[in-house]
Amino acid sequence: MAVTWGLDPKARAIRVYYEGESTIYEGMPLCYNYDTTDNWMGVSAADYTAETGTTAEGYQNEGKFIRVENPSASNLAHFAGVVAGCGKQGQTGPCVLDMYIPNGAVVPVRCDIDTTVGITILALTSASQELGALVADSRPVAIAMETETALDGTADITLAKLDPSLFSFNYGTSAAAYAVSTGTYPVNLEYVEFTSGAPSVGFIQDNRLLYDGAMTAGQLTVDNNYLHFTGTNTAAGKSYLRGSVDMVHLDGCTLNSAGLFIAGCCAQLGGTPTAFTACERAAALWVDIGVGTHPDAGSISLVYLSENGTSYIDAVFQLRTPRTDYFAKFSGEETTGAHHYIYAMTADHTTGATDKALKCDVAGVTYYIPLFDGLGA
C-alpha cells in the first residue's frame, strides 16, 4: 500500500508565465490574463508561418492559458491558482513559475485572516496578493483546512481546499457590484447557515438559508426560495428581516421614456396551457399569513403599504383593463366577530343581520362601509 505525506496527491502544478512585477510569495493567488493578445509560441495568426509576438482574437492564442497576472476587479472570474513551492520566494516578476491549479486539492495558500478548519471561506480579492475575507471586489475560492490564530493582518501560509466550484459566483462587468460594508458576507450558495457573527447588513442570495445567528440592528435582505429563521432579535434599533425580496434602486440613472414600466416586484401568471378545464384557484400573487399568535406589540396585516423617502404616488392601486365584473370578490366567514374582514351588521343597521359592511380602522376608531346587494331605483 502506497503512503503519501507532505503533499496532497490530487495537487497538480503547471508552469505558467507571471507577467506582474510584484514580489512573489508561496501560495500567492494568480489569475489568467484572459483577454491578452500576447502569445507564447510566437506564431502569426495570419498564415501560421510568420514569427510574431501577438495573436489576434479568434485564432486560439495560447497566451490566454499560459500568461497569469495579479487579481483585479476585471479578472476575478478567471482564477488560475496559487504559486507552488518557494523556489521563486522573494523574487519579482515577470518570470516563469509553477502554480497549483484549483482542482479541489488541499494546498498551501497565502492568507491574511485567522481561520477555522473546514469553516472559514477564503476569497480572491482585487489588488491583493493573498486570500482573505469576503469584501468588495472579491470572490470565494477556497475553504481553510487549518485553524490559524496568528494570521489576522499578517499574511502567511495555511492549508486550504482550493475549489471555486464550491461557490456560485454571479460575475458581472465588475466585481465592484458586490461591494458591501465591512463585516458582511456576499455569498451565493445552495445552502448557507450563519451560526455566529451573522451579518446585520448585506445581501445573500441562495436557495435555502438557515439564519441561526443573532440579528443586530440593520437590514438583511435575502433573495431565496426558503428562509428558515431560528435566531434571535433583541436589538435596540430597528431591524428588518426580508425573505424573497425583489428590489429596484433608481440611482444616478436617466429616465426619459414615456413607455417605461418600473416595478419593485412583478408577479406574473401566463402562458397557453393545452388544457385548462379545471382549477381550484389561479392567482398571479397569493398573499398568505399564518402566524398563529398575535404579537403583544405591533400589528399584522395582509398587505402593508409604506412610503420610503420622497415618493410620488398617483394611485395605491391602478387597474389596467381588468376583464371582470368585480373589483374584489370576498368569501369566508360573515358572522359578527372582531377579526372578520366581512362584517354582518346587526344592531348597527336597521335592515337586519343579512346586510354586509366592510370593517375599517381609522386612527384606532372602527368604522363600517355599508354594502348592498342592489343599487336601488
Image: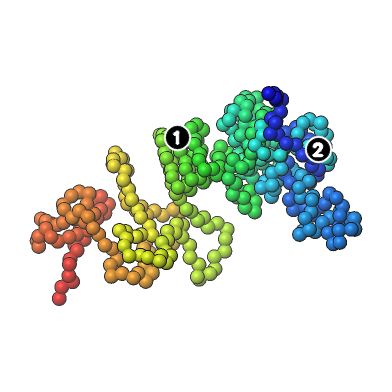
Q: Which residue is mark 1?
A: 212
310 relative position to 374: left or right: right
Q: Quadrant of residue 52?
A: bottom right
What amino acid is found at the position of numbered circle 2 in the picture? Leu
Mark-to-mark CA distance, 2 and 1: 44 Å
Q: Residue at x 71, y 43 (%)?
A: 80
Kind of element beneath mark 1: loop
Residue at x-position 34% and y-position 70%: 323
What residue appears at the point 56 percent right and 37 percent down from the top-left corner?
183
Q: Quadrant of residue 367?
A: bottom left
Dot 1 alpha-carbon crowd within 10 angstroms: few under 14, some 14 to 19, many 20 or more: some
Q: Residue furthest bottom?
A: 377
Q: Is residue 174 left or right of residue 70?
A: left
Q: Which mark is residue 97?
A: 2
Residue 329 pos. (x, y %): 26, 62
Q: Position of residue 102 (x, y in %)?
A: 68, 39
Q: Determine whether 199 is above or below 242 in the image.
A: above
Q: Nearer the viewer, residue 209 or 152?
A: 209
Residue 93 or 238: which is nearer the viewer? 93
Which colour style is shown? rainbow
Residue at the image position 75 percent from the left and 34 percent from the top: 84
